[in-house]
Amino acid sequence: PHTAKKIADKCRTRVFATLPEMVEAVEAVSVVTPTMNHLASAEPFLRKGRHVLVEKPIAMDTREARELVTLAEKNGAKLAVGHVERFNPVLAALEERLGRPRFIEAHRLSPYPGRSTDIGVVMDLMIHDLEIILHLVRSPVTSVDAVGVPVLSKGEDIANARIRFENGCVANITTSRISPEKLRKIRVFQDDAYLSLDYMKQEGEIYRREGGKITRDKIPVRKGEPLKNQLEEFLDNVRHGTDPRVGGTHGFEALQLASRICEQLTPVGP
């Protein structure tokens, strides 16, 4: 209680003794709990028509995710999912230059976190890239091949997935949470160009062939804090009744693909 009051005073808000008390008092809520608690935490708010921003992954499994989406639709509530990388200015710069993606390569590496180990690295980190790639390609998935191994956790700590889409695009994604360095990059190869972007540095380059020569140009990126962008946009959704950039259905589809990858994970080695 003392810690809660201290934080509430700092944020100029109030402390609620029970969840039902909070449900009655708020218009919108951000659910930032372990994934296993997402459904139990978000459900009472959605039933009352309260707007919810829930951390990714949207839920533990597709059944729970579908339940959240249905509750939001039934009760007229906005359901946003915290795929924060979609709010990175780098992605906006990429989309402005996006043609027809033929091959996409994504790398997301980080040191061992000591948290979020209730889920494997596919659900913890790779799901960011899965949601982005689904958004960029906009075509049904036709096949998935995946490998992964646990190193320090019960679930996989390193994973690689190759995804083929109906329109011919192929995506190759590598994710690790036991890397000595942080790395978050995406490379898109399309008919007229190759784009390379760094989510962390918020920088990018575009390579083109012009007159028999390969040109290399910087991609201008208006830098900004993705989490701040996400929270501000969620509040705008609530105030003006607009749809979230990453809604419940997007979160469900990303979780569905991540679950498919987890089911097909084969161990590396003999």
Image (cartoon, rainbow, N blue to C red):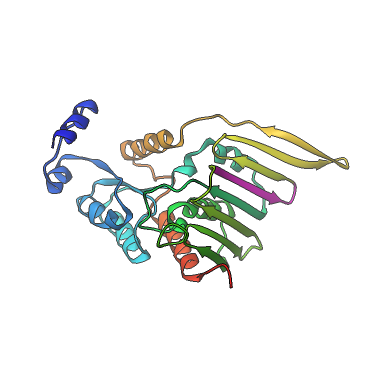
In the drawing, does residue 52 fall left or right of residue 44? right
In this rendering, position of residue 102 left or right of residue 178: right
Looking at the image, residue 157 lies above or below residue 27: below
Residue drawn 13% across the image and 48% down it = 20
Q: Residue at x 44, y 65 (%)?
A: 259
Number of numbered tags placed on the structure image? 0
Q: Position of residue 155 (x, y in %)?
A: 42, 62
Q: Quadrant of residue 139?
A: bottom right
Up/down of 80 relative to 228, above or below? below
Is residue 121 one of those drawn in magenta? no
On the image, the x and y values in percent for residue 32 come to 31, 46
User: Which is nearer the eye, 78 or 185?
Assistant: 185
Give the quarter of the image for residue 9.
top left
Q: Give the residue at x 58% y 56%.
A: 173
Q: Is residue 106 above or below residue 8?
A: below
Give the residue furthest to the right.
Answer: 212
Residue at (58%, 50%) from the top-left corner?
A: 107
Which residue is more in the foreground, 144 or 74?
Answer: 144
Image quadrant for the N terminus? Answer: top left
Is 212 on the left-hand or right-hand side of 69?
Answer: right
Main secondary structure along the magenta-highlighted residues:
strand
The one nearer the camera, 196 or 48, is 196
**Of residues 230 and 74, the one drawn nearer to the viewer in this rendering:** 230
Q: Quadrant of residue 203?
A: top right
**Which stretch is magenta?**
183-192
Is residue 185 highlighted in magenta? yes
Q: Position of residue 254 (x, y in %)?
A: 46, 57
Q: Residue 112, percent across and down?
A: 45, 48
For the C terminus, the quadrant is bottom right
